Image (cartoon, rainbow, N blue to C red):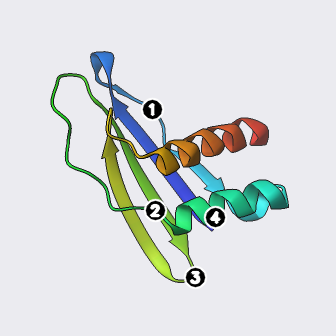
Amino acid sequence: MRIEVRQQGGFAGLRRPPMVIETEDLEPGLARELESLAAALPAGGPPGRGADLVRYDVLVDDPSGRRSATFFEPGVPGEVRELLRLARSAGRRKS
């Protein structure tokens, strides 16, 4: 499974390079956890109200197809926060 996370916005409208995770390159336990969270990716939500909101675009490619969702702070669901945390952790481990 391929998971791509794009983050933009926040103070000064920062745009970070996309984080791309290939779960086949990870340890099996972490790969299963990320795949489970990505498989249950909820629909994105409407933008919150306020300036400088952080936006996360999450794209998932797996055998069933490609899907994506967009989330805005502060309304990011807990399971998506966990997916983002694990993806960041996996990205650091690959470096």
Badge 3: residue crowd in 10 Å (few <14, some 14–19, many ≥20) = few
The percent coordinates of residue 45 (x first, y second) are 26, 51
Q: How many marks?
A: 4
- Residue 35, disc: 4
Residue furthest to the top in view is 12
Q: Amino acid at mark 1?
A: Arg
Q: CA distance from mark 3 to mark 4?
A: 12 Å
Badge 1: residue crowd in 10 Å (few <14, some 14–19, many ≥20) = few
Q: Which residue is mark 2?
A: 41
Tell me the quarter of the picture where residue 25 sits.
bottom right
Badge 2: residue crowd in 10 Å (few <14, some 14–19, many ≥20) = some
Q: Amino acid at mark 3?
A: Pro
Q: Which tag, 3 or 2, sits closer to the chain's start?
A: 2
Q: Which residue is mark 3?
A: 63
Contact between labelled residues 3 and 1, with CB atoms less than 8 Å apart: no
Q: Amino acid at mark 2?
A: Leu
Q: CA distance from mark 3 to mark 2?
A: 15 Å
Contact between labelled residues 2 and 3, with CB atoms less than 8 Å apart: no
Q: Which residue is mark 1?
A: 16
Q: Which tag, 1 or 3, sits closer to the chain's start?
A: 1
Q: Amino acid at mark 4?
A: Glu
Q: Which tag, 4 or 2, sits closer to the chain's start?
A: 4
Q: Which tag, 3 or 4, sits closer to the chain's start?
A: 4
